[in-house]
């Protein structure tokens, strides 16, 4: 016979399923108070100082997006740990015209970065002799005057080379110096911010966090920046950045943050993302979002520039046609046609329209360059032949055949 104790099913503990019931004559059982939710942890010093710096920047300038504010804030902070990074990202502050706030942003940055070195009218030799093992932060306003025309760009080629080399550690420049003409190595590694009208040379833009400024719309207000009044709060924030980041130098050197981009974009953004990870809070997500969105925008801009090259090829063919399809055109005449035609975009390409240097850079990827030729009147000048463009025209912008033109 089965044991009743073993065959009787166990009943659930109903006391755990139902609230206590008041019984007459018996005091009610106390109900435990609901558990209190823990208070959110106070922001870390890094989180707090970055948030305050972002608000200070927001007081004086209008940037194109929230991601741009994040990028500028983190770039400023990263200058205080330059010796921890493998790459020194440039901050390219560019706009299509004057009065877009480029110089004002540079003013604010100057008062909050590590050891600012303003390089207005400074020679490349003076700049690389100012870079030491603890590099300053280079600040270049009106950078378009350094690289605008072909003649000026050629004169400042050494500065462009310095800015390119200084993006990566251990890329010194070599100079012969001293009475014995000995070869000396000068370091180039330093973070740099450059502001100017129009895009900077491609090699610099490719190494930059790019902030594309715009003029303020009616109703967009910012505070005026006054040196004596407004620099003390920025200096106080700078000192807090130093106090927060200096003890984290060794940790920063070991960081290998997960990046949402690859290749050179990852190299350029890694210091900013590292600072965000050190700060914690919302900054890691903000940094990676800014990195992904802004890097994608620049990649699309580069693609647009490739399309612009194709547009240039088509417009040059049109210029040859306008002139009666001569065997060759002088560069000066070609530029006159391109810049004077209202249906073409070249008059607004820079403040001086499309320049010989700009033309050269746009045609470089098609292996087309001007050559010195003899033109009508026995005049020697640089120019282009129709034959130079024939292959590129056929590959990138072939003329429509009669069948495609009629939709057949």
Image (cartoon, rainbow, N blue to C red):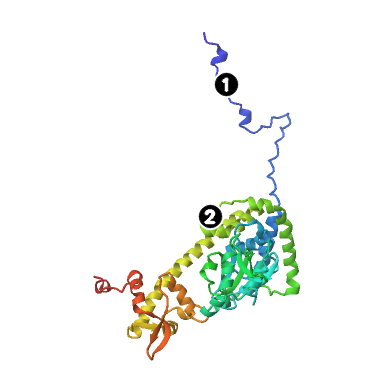
Asked if residue 401 is positioned above or below residue 287 in the image, the reply reads: below
- Name the side, left or right, on which 405 lies relative to 125: left
> Can residue 95 be seen?
yes
What residue is at 61 percent from the left and 63 percent from the top?
172
Q: Is residue 215 above or below residue 271?
A: below
- Per the image, the residue denoted by label 1 is 10
Position in image of residue 228 (x %, y %): 76, 74
Residue 375 position by quadrant: bottom left
Q: Residue at x 62, y 55 (%)?
A: 274
Residue 83 location, quadrant: bottom right
Instruction: Give the Cα distance between marks 1 and 2.
Output: 56 Å
> Is residue 328 shown left or right of residue 182?
left
Disc on the earlier residue, 1 or 2: 1
The residue lying toward the viewer, choosing from 387 and 315, is 387
Q: How many marks are shown on the rendered structure?
A: 2
Residue 105 makes an appearance in the image:
no
**Residue at the image point whose x is 53% and y is 71% from the top:** 201
Above or below — where is 274 with respect to 3?
below
Please report the residue visible at 65 percent of the width from the left and 75 percent of the height from the top: 122
Q: In this rendering, which labeled residue sits more in front, label 1 or label 2? A: 2
Sort mark 1 into few (<14), some (14-19) or many (20+) by Cα contacts within 10 Å: few
Which residue bears the numbered disc 2?
Answer: 260
Residue 220 drawn at (x, y percent): 61, 73
Q: Name the quarter where the C terminus is drawn.
A: bottom left
**Residue 42's spot in the image, x, y percent?**
71, 52
Mark 1 falls on what kind of element? loop
What is the number of the mark on residue 405? Answer: none
Local secondary structure at mark 2: loop
Residue 137 location, x and y as percent? 66, 66
- Label 2 crowd bin: few (<14), some (14–19), many (20+), radius 10 Å: some
Q: Nearer the viewer, residue 186 or 3?
A: 186
């Amino acid at each position: 016979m089965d044991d009743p104790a073993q065959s009787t099913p166990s009943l659930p503990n109903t006391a755990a399923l139902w609230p206590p019931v008041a019984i007459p004559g018996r005091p009610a059982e106390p109900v435990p108070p609901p558990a209190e939710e823990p208070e959110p942890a106070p922001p870390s010093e890094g989180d707090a100082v970055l948030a305050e710096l972002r608000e200070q920047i927001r007081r004086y300038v209008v940037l194109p997006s929230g991601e741009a504010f994040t990028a500028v804030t983190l770039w400023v902070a990263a200058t205080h740990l330059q010796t921890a990074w493998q790459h020194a990202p440039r901050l390219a502050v560019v706009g299509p015209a004057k009065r877009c706030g480029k110089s004002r942003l540079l003013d604010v940055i100057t008062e909050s970065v590590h050891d600012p070195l303003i390089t207005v009218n400074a020679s490349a030799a003076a700049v690389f002799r100012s870079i030491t093992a603890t590099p300053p932060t280079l600040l270049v306003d009106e950078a378009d005057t350094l690289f605008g025309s072909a003649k000026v760009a050629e004169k400042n080629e050494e500065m462009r080379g310095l800015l390119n080399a200084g993006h990566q550690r251990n890329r010194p420049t070599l100079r012969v110096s001293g009475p014995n003409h000995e070869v000396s190595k000068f370091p180039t590694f330093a973070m740099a911010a450059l502001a100017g009208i129009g895009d900077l040379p491609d090699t610099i833009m490719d190494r930059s966090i790019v902030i594309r400024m715009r003029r303020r719309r009616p109703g967009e207000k910012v505070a005026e920046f006054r040196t004596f009044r407004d620099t003390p709060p920025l200096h106080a924030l700078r000192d807090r950045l130093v106090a927060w980041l200096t003890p984290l130098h060794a940790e920063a050197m070991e960081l290998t943050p997960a990046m949402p981009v690859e290749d050179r974009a990852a190299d350029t953004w890694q210091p900013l993302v590292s600072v965000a990870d050190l700060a914690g809070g919302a900054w890691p997500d903000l940094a990676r979002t800014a990195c992904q969105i802004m890097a994608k925008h620049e990649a699309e801009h580069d693609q647009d520039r490739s399309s612009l090259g194709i547009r240039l090829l088509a417009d040059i063919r049109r210029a040859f046609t306008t002139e009666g399809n001569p065997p060759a055109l002088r560069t000066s005449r070609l530029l006159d046609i391109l810049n004077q035609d209202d249906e073409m975009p070249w008059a607004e390409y820079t403040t001086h329209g499309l320049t010989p240097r700009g033309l050269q850079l746009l045609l470089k990827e098609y292996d087309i360059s001007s050559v010195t030729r003899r033109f009508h009147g026995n005049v020697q000048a640089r120019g282009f032949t129709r034959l130079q463009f024939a292959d590129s025209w056929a590959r990138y912008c072939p003329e429509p055949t009669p069948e495609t033109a009629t939709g057949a």
